[in-house]
C-alpha cells in the first residue's frame, strides 16, 4: 500500500502539471483531469488500507460498542439486578432504605407511570401515566373479564416479582400496588412479600 500511495502521489503531481500545461497551451482539460482523479483515488485507497489507519478505525469501533453496551445496561430496570438494590440499602436506616427503594422504583417505572410511597400503609403505589396503559386500565376497571386478553397477568407477574425483591431488600411488611388511573385512591393490583393480595381480575 505504501508503493501505491507513493506512485499515486507522483502521478498526482505529474497529472497536475500536465493539466495546467494542457489548459494553458491547448485549452484541453479532459486528459489531465482523468489522470488527476485516478491518481487521487489511488492515494486515498492506499491511505485507507494502511494497517495503522485500520487499527484506528477498529479502536474507535470498539469504543463505540463499549459505550453502547454501557448505555443499554444503564437503562435497564434496577429490579433486574437484585444485588444492586441490596447493596444500596444494606447499611442504611430503615427510612433511608425505603427512600432508596422508592428511587429505584421511580427509575424502573419511569416510562410506565409515577411512583409514590405511603409510609402509613407501607405501600409503594405505581400510578400509570402512559396513555395506552391508562386507557387499557380504565377499560379493565369497567370490565375485569377482559384481563386475560389484555395481557394483565404478564404485568402483574412483573409486579409480583418486584414485590419479592423489595421483601428481600428491606423486609416483609411492604406492598406494591398498581393504582387505578381513573381513581388513584383505589388499587387494581397489590402484591406483598412476592404474593398477590388483591387482583381486580379475580373479583
Image (cartoon, grey):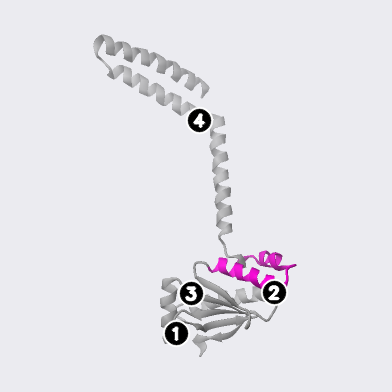
Q: Which circle, 4 or 3, is nearer the viewer? A: 3
Question: If you read the primary sequence from the N terminus, does the residue marked by circle 4 or circle 2 appear first?
Answer: 4
Determine the main secondary structure of the stretch shown in magenta. helix
- Which residue lies under the disc numbered 1? 141
Q: Is residue 98 magenta?
A: yes
Residue 14: quarter of image: top left
Label 2 close to label 3 by CB (< 8 Å): no
Q: Which circle, 2 or 1, is nearer the viewer? A: 2
Residue displayed at 57% across by 39% down: 59
Name above or below for residue 180 compared with residue 10.
below
Magenta residue span:
80-109
Label 2 close to label 1 by CB (< 8 Å): no
- Which residue lies under the disc numbered 3? 128
**How far separated are the C-alphas under marks 3 and 1?**
13 Å
Please provide percent x and percent y for residue 6.
48, 18
The numbered mark at residue 49 is: 4
**How far separated are the C-alphas under marks 2 and 1?**
31 Å
The numbered mark at residue 201 is: none
- Which residue lies under the disc numbered 2? 170
Please provide percent x and percent y for residue 46.
48, 26
Label 4 close to label 3 by CB (< 8 Å): no
Name above or below for residue 44 compared with residue 90.
above
| In the displayed structure image, the side of residue 144 where residue 20 appears, left or right | left
Q: Which circle, 3 or 1, is nearer the viewer? A: 3
**How far separated are the C-alphas under marks 4 and 3?**
54 Å
Name above or below for residue 183 compared with residue 101.
below
Amino acid at each position: 500500500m505504501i508503493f501505491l500511495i507513493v506512485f499515486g502521489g507522483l502521478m498526482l503531481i505529474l497529472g497536475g502539471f500536465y493539466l495546467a500545461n494542457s489548459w494553458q497551451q491547448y485549452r484541453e482539460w479532459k486528459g489531465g483531469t482523468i489522470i488527476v482523479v485516478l491518481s487521487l483515488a489511488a492515494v486515498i485507497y492506499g491511505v485507507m488500507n494502511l494497517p495503522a489507519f485500520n487499527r484506528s478505525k477498529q479502536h474507535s469501533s470498539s469504543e463505540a460498542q463499549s459505550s453502547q453496551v454501557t448505555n443499554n445496561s444503564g437503562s435497564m430496570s434496577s429490579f433486574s439486578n437484585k444485588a444492586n438494590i441490596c447493596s444500596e440499602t444494606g447499611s442504611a436506616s430503615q427510612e433511608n432504605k425505603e427512600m432508596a427503594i422508592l428511587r429505584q422504583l421511580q427509575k424502573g417505572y419511569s416510562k410506565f407511570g409515577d411512583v409514590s410511597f405511603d409510609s402509613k400503609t407501607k405501600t409503594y403505589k405505581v400510578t400509570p401515566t402512559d396513555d395506552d396503559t391508562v386507557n387499557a386500565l380504565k377499560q379493565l376497571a369497567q370490565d375485569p373479564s377482559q384481563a386475560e386478553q389484555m395481557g394483565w397477568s404478564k404485568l402483574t407477574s412483573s409486579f409480583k416479582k418486584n414485590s419479592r425483591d423489595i421483601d428481600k431488600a428491606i423486609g416483609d411488611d411492604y406492598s406494591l400496588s398498581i393504582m387505578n388511573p381513573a381513581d388513584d385512591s383505589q388499587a387494581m393490583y397489590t402484591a406483598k412479600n412476592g404474593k398477590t393480595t388483591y387482583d381486580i381480575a379475580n373479583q
